[in-house]
C-alpha cells in the first residue's frame, strides 16, 4: 500500500489534470474534491477516455487504456468512502500544497522544464506534463525532500498514470532539472 504522501501526489495528479483541462481554479477543484466523493472517479474516467481517444487517433499507441480509479477518503479503486480528515488515506497538507503551488508557480516550473525537454512543453501528454510539474515543483520549492525521493515518486506516478514507458522520460527530465536546481545537494552526495 502506498504511503499517505504518495497517495497525496496521486490525487494531485488527477486534480491538476482537471485544472489543466477545465480551467477551473485550484480552490474550485479542491471544493469538488472534498464535497463530491464521485468527482475523483469521474476525473479518472475522463482521463481514461482522453487516452482512449488519443490512442484511436494514433497519437499514443503505448497509452494505457484506463487510469486508476481513486476516490477521496477511500482506497484507490474503491467507489466510495468518507472524506473526513481522520479517514483520509493521504496527506491533506501535501495535496493542498501541490494543488495550489503548481498553478501558482507554473511559470517558474515550466521555465525550469523547458530547458530540459526534447520537445515543447505543450506537446507532452497532459498527465505526464503534470507529473513533471509536480516533480519540478518539489525540486524547486521543497528543498527538505531529497532529490532521489522526488524523482522516485514522480517515476511511480508515471508508471501508474503515464504512457507505457513514460516513466523513463519523466526520470530523465527530472534528473536534468535536479542537476540544475539542486547542484549543491548532488555534489555533496557524490563527494564532488
Image: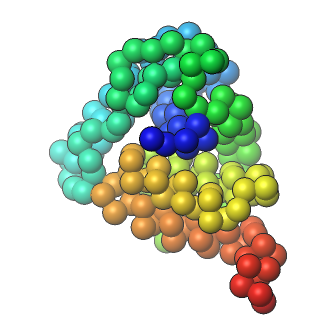
Where does the image place residue 35, in percent across and percent down from the top left? 56, 10
Where does the image place residue 13, in percent across and percent down from the top left? 51, 39
Q: Is residue 129 left or right of residue 162?
A: right
Q: Is residue 175 left or right of residue 167?
A: right
Q: Quadrant of the C terminus?
A: bottom right
Q: Quadrant of residue 149?
A: bottom right
Colouring mode (rainbow / by chain / secondary structure / one colour) = rainbow
- Compared with 34, 63 (above or below) is below
Where does the image place residue 152, in percent across and percent down from the top left? 54, 60
Q: Residue at x 64, y 18 (%)?
A: 85
Q: Residue furthest left?
A: 56
- Compared with 25, 17 (above or below) is below
User: Looking at the image, which is closer to me, 45 or 56?
Assistant: 45
Q: Residue at x 62, y 65 (%)?
A: 148
Where does the image place residue 128, in percent across and percent down from the top left? 46, 51
- Compared with 181, 45 (above or below) is above
Q: Is residue 184 left or right of residue 151?
A: right
Q: Residue at x 57, y 19 (%)?
A: 87
Q: Residue furthest top?
A: 35
Q: Residue at x 74, y 45 (%)?
A: 105
Amino acid at each position: 500500500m502506498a504511503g499517505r504522501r504518495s497517495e497525496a501526489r496521486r490525487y494531485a495528479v488527477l486534480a491538476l489534470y482537471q485544472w489543466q483541462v477545465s480551467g477551473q481554479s485550484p480552490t474550485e477543484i479542491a471544493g469538488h474534491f472534498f464535497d463530491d466523493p464521485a468527482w475523483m472517479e469521474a476525473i479518472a474516467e475522463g482521463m481514461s477516455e482522453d487516452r482512449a481517444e488519443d490512442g484511436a487517433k494514433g497519437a499514443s499507441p503505448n497509452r494505457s487504456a484506463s487510469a486508476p480509479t481513486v476516490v477521496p477518503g477511500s482506497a484507490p479503486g474503491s467507489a466510495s468512502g468518507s472524506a473526513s480528515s481522520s479517514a483520509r488515506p493521504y496527506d491533506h497538507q501535501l495535496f493542498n500544497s501541490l494543488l495550489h503551488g503548481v498553478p501558482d508557480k507554473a511559470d517558474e516550473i515550466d521555465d525550469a522544464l523547458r530547458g530540459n525537454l526534447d520537445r515543447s512543453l505543450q506537446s507532452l501528454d497532459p498527465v505526464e506534463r503534470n507529473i513533471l510539474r509536480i516533480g519540478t515543483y518539489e525540486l524547486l520549492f521543497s528543498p527538505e525532500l531529497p532529490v532521489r525521493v522526488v524523482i522516485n515518486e514522480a517515476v511511480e506516478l508515471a508508471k501508474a498514470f503515464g504512457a507505457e514507458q513514460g516513466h523513463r522520460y519523466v526520470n530523465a527530465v527530472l534528473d536534468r532539472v535536479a542537476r540544475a536546481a539542486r547542484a549543491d545537494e548532488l555534489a555533496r552526495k557524490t563527494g564532488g
